Amino acid sequence: MSFDYLFQRPDRVLALTAQHLTLSLQAMLLALVFALPLGFVAAANRRLTLPIVSLLGAIYTVPSLAFLAFLIPSLGIGRLPATIVLAAYAQLFLVRNIVIGLRGVDPATLEAAAGTGMTPAQVFRLVRWPLALPVMLTGLRVAFVTTISLATVAAWIDAGGLGTLLFEGIARDDPDRILAGAVAITALALLADGLLRVVERNTAAGRARRAAAR
């Protein structure tokens, strides 16, 4: 096993990396469309928190290949079923951290903000949301890195991405192709994790917490 394929076909590896990243981003955007309202509802109503999180946890336990196979009869193969499956898996991390972030804000801080004359909408937008943001960004980071990893299996239903190299390598008994795909996927996941960690550290609340820790 060597890095020959990675150096001999960098154009194809980069093209598949772009497909992989695009698929992951599309899945995350779709996931946020559902996770944000679900998280707000679960944070506001404690009776709904456990059922919502439990349902999302159950979805996450479904094997990815089985989930994809379940959607093929109705949606066919390609990017659409892959995007839906990846978005479904991301829900658990996103919703859970939205709930933790919003509930973790000190009630005394919210009361003080309301005491200054802020409306409930202003308290949420100017106080509660910024303070909860670092925790929510942590959920986003974990969800995105997980999505990049899980997107590998999307190649099984012709959705493209770096998983193509893994499946081709297995079919052709080509370890170099498998290694190229594995290295590219790992590098992409590490890069995404690093960039989102920088975003977390540079939120206003994150800066305030670091200052207080000093």
Image (spheres, helix red, strand yellow):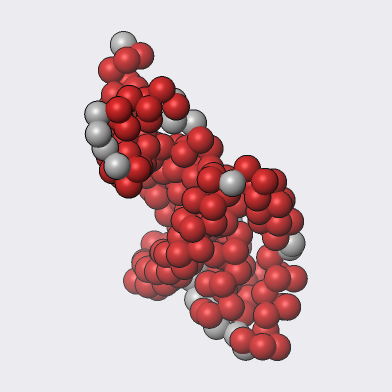
From where the camera sits, is residue 117 visible?
yes
Residue visible at 29% across and 24% down in the picture: 208
Front one among 123 and 170: 123
Residue visible at 47% across and 39% down in the picture: 102
Residue 152, image x and y in percent? 57, 65
In this view, 58 is above or below 70? above
Residue visible at 44% across and 43% down in the picture: 136
Residue visible at 53% across and 45% down in the picture: 44
- 134 horizontally vs 1: left or right: left
Q: Quadrant of residue 11?
A: bottom left
Q: Quadrant of residue 119?
A: top left
* Quadrant where the N terminus is found in the figure: bottom right
Front one among 65 and 121: 121
- 199 horizontally vs 177: left or right: left
From where the camera sits, is residue 182 visible?
no
Residue 22, image x and y in percent? 40, 69
Residue 75, image x and y in percent? 62, 86
In this view, 13 is above or below 142? below
In the image as oriented, which residue stretches furthest toward the top? 214
Q: Quadrant of residue 114?
A: top left
Residue 94, image x and y in percent? 52, 50
- 111 horizontally vs 104: left or right: left
